[in-house]
Image: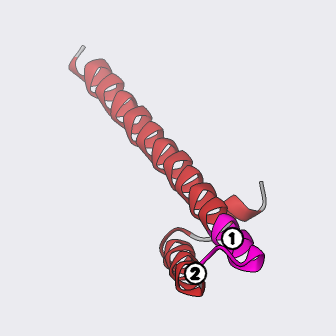
Amino acid sequence: MAGFLDRAKEQAQRGLTQGKQKLDEVQAQRAGGDLLKKLGAAYFAEQRGTGDPRATLQALQELEAHIATNGDGFLRG
């Protein structure tokens, strides 16, 4: 009986770990999309003459940092 409970506990723990990894992936993709949107808005404002080039550069640096940490998978989907 103890062997069965140990296996069930192990399987539940694996499921929790996989669920957390998936949640982290989704959150990173969402954050990447938000940063990409921020960059686009800053660039658009700059091109229209109402934005500051420093805001565009800042948004680009934030996006590059996110990609360095989380990869660029969010750009493909």
Q: Is residue 60 above or below residue 22?
A: below
**Disc 2 marks which residue?**
52
* Residue drawn at (58%, 56%) of the image: 34
- Residue 51 in the image: state x and y as whole percent: 62, 75
Residue 40 covered by magenta stretch: yes
Mark number displayed over residue 77: none
Q: Which of the 4 quarters of the picture holds residue 12? A: top left
Q: Which residues are magenta?
A: 39-51
Residue type indicated by callout 1: Ala
Q: Categorize mark 1 by other alpha carbons within 10 Å: few (<14), some (14-19), many (20+).
A: some
Quadrant position of the N terminus in the picture: top left
Tell how many labels. 2
* Residue drawn at (77%, 53%) of the image: 77
- Residue 39 in the image: state x and y as whole percent: 63, 70
- Residue 65 in the image: state x and y as whole percent: 49, 78
**Disc 1 marks which residue?**
45
